[in-house]
Each structure stands twice: as structure tokens, then as C-alpha cells.
Amino acid sequence: VYYIHAHYMEDLSLGDIAEYVNVVPTYLSSVFRREMGQTVNNYLVALRMRKAQEFLASTNLKVAEIAQAVGIRNTRYFSACFKKEVGQSPNDYREAHRILPREQRS
């Protein structure tokens, strides 16, 4: 979990994480699911979407830039993941949760 939080913004795979903790990917997947109640991928996507929510609410970065910042290279995939996880599009979320001072909004 520590490694995922430290590297979520990178192109991170189950194999990368397994290598870091020095186990085979299938074993990591099994242990992670048992201990965390979800798959590594689901945990990683949820983390990325939480970080994206922070960016959307507090920055003027474009959605594509936020997708890159949280480790997702494909903007369409990012938007689909975001909508599935959060229940609204990134742009709708931004409008509803904006915390920037009015003079900094664009």
C-alpha cells in the first residue's frame, strides 16, 4: 500500500508492485485481495480518482493534465474511470466542488 501511494502517478503494474515487495504477482494479488478486500487494480484506480478529485477542486489544470498527473495516459479512459468511481464527469465534479477563490477561476 505504501508503494502504491508513493508511485500511483507512474505507469504502475501489479508486476512492479510485486517486484518491490519481492513476491510473485499472483501471490501479491491473493494477499492484497484478502487483506484489503479489493484487487490491487481497484485500489489503485480508487486512489487515482481521489487524487484527481483533489486536483479538480483545487486547480485549473485541464482534465488531460490531471489524468497524466495521476498516472493515466488516456484521457478517455480516465474520464470513464472517474465517472464510474465518482458518479459524475470530471468537469461536472469540478463545477460542483470548486474551492479556488473566484478571481482564480477561469
Image: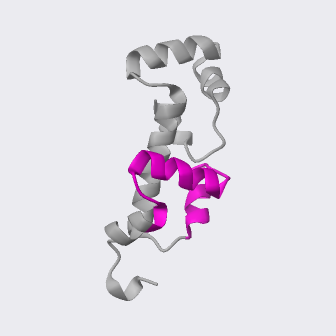
Residue 97 figure quarter: bottom left
Q: Where is residue 47 shown, x and y percent of the image?
A: 45, 42
User: Magenta segment: does it hold 86?
Assistant: yes
Return the residue found at the far bottom. 103
Asked which quadrant contains residue 75, the reply is bottom right
Front in this rendered view, residue 85 or 71: 85
User: Considering only vertical position in the picture, is 70 above or below 57?
Assistant: above
Q: x%, y% of residue 8?
A: 55, 42
The residue range painted magenta reads: 62-91
Secondary structure of the magenta portion, mostly? helix
x and y percentages locating residue 92 in the rendered image: 42, 66
Total residue callouts: 0
Q: Residue at x 39, y 52 (%)?
A: 87
How far across and how far down the image is residue 15, in percent? Answer: 67, 24
**Residue at the image point whose x is 46% and y is 46% from the top:** 84
What residue do we see at 46% from left, 32% from top?
2
User: Magenta stretch containing residue 40, yes or no?
Assistant: no
Q: In this rendering, does residue 56 appear at all? A: yes
Q: On the picture, is 92 further left or further right than 21?
A: left
